[in-house]
Amino acid sequence: MYCLELAGDADDEAFAALEARRAAADAVSVVAPGVATARGVRTERVRHLAYTHRVAELVGRTDASVESAVALLEAASIDREGSVAVRGRNVRSTADASTSEAERALGGVLVDRGFSVDLDDPDHELRAVFSGEDCFLGWEVAASVRDFGQRRPTDRPFFQPGSMAPLDARAYVNVAAGRALPDATVLDPMCGTGGILVEAGLVGARALGSDAQWKMARGARENLSALLPTDDWDVVRGDATDLPFRDDAADAVVFDAPYGRQSKIARHELSDLVGGALSEVARVAPSAVLVADRSWEEAAEDAGLRVEERFERRVHGSLVRHVHVLSRE
């Protein structure tokens, strides 16, 4: 059994669990604020998750007190040796426990059992996660790489307002492509500045994009050239309602529909654009994530897609993203 430390706030937990389940773990369940458990984990994929910070092999679960955590560790069998560091965390300050006291006390137990302490480069790291009424002890096995701030939309060679944050783009790619990663092809038919495609490339997928505007297609190519370490991508100019790709060209589609405005493609009303794009999604890939400022469930079903999940995620002010997780009927 594994313990997952989830990122985000309380409203993100169900979405975080879905991302982990789709891309890296089995039988994921949220069991406490900011904490989930899983039966199995693909540790090599954890580094690419957006809404999971760390994964630990679970030693056990007990009451959220230092005394209970110490008793749990003293009773546990430990089949490892060498140096160790203990890291405590109080999730959103939901537990009445001192993490510094827990680190000292649990470190003392491990020293008594023959470990040396190395806070800089330990052989093993014990996580003590206090959340609500519970404490979870586990040996860290993987952590995500939190480098999203290095790819802020405003820092890219080509920028346009309204670009999606890299953290969210990464999560949507993981949800859509899931177990097909890293050998997946991910398509964004309204790619804009290419932010979703960048995150797809960084998790190992082949990135395909199209946009109706030459300006956007050129700008996306500029960003992908600057930010992806490989050239396993392509961006073309194309109409999202008539994509220049063959049937089943991709493993997953991820796209961010226009928000509250007409499409830049003059001949399309917004409803025609999104409905037509969804019909093309059903043709080119078995799985998709559509992000929009409203529900497009009916249009997705009309296009022959099943709405497996839909999340409403507040971005700021009155802007709420409706995240549709879709699969081909």
Image (tube, rainbow, N blue to C red):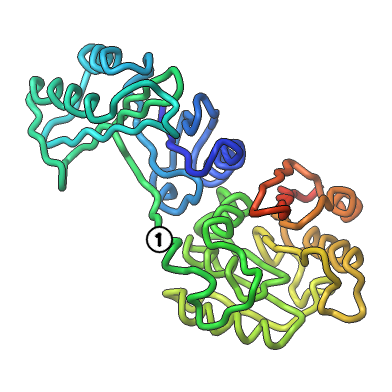
Above or below, comparing residue 88 to residue 309 in the picture? above
Q: Secondary structure at mark 1?
A: loop
Residue for point 56% across, 45% down:
19
Instruction: Say if residue 38 shows up in the picture.
Output: no
Instruction: Say if residue 97 shows up in the picture.
Output: yes
- Count of numbered tags: 1
Q: Position of residue 326 (x, y in %)?
A: 74, 49
> Alpha-carbon neighbours of circle 1 within 10 Å: few (<14), some, or many (≥20)?
few
266 displayed left or right of 162: right
Location of the N terminus (image quadrant): top left
Q: Position of residue 47 (x, y in %)?
A: 40, 51
Residue for point 71% across, 56% down:
291
Name the residue furthest front: 317
Asked where in the image residue 54 lies, by quadrant, the reply is top left
Asked where in the image residue 145 lies, by quadrant, the reply is bottom left
6 displayed left or right of 327: left
Residue for point 67% across, 64% down:
250
Above or below, comparing residue 312 to residue 203 in the picture? above
Residue on which the image places disc 1: 147
Above or below, comparing residue 48 to residue 166 in the picture? above
Name the residue nearer the viewer: 284 or 55. Answer: 55
5 displayed left or right of 127: right
Q: Position of residue 16 (x, y in %)?
A: 55, 41
Q: Amino acid at mark 1?
A: Asp
Name the residue nearer the viewer: 198 or 108. Answer: 108
Q: Position of residue 221 (x, y in %)?
A: 58, 82
Name the residue nearer the viewer: 8 or 299. Answer: 8
Asked where in the image residue 150 lies, by quadrant, the reply is bottom left
Residue for point 74% across, 43% down:
310
298 displayed left or right of 173: right
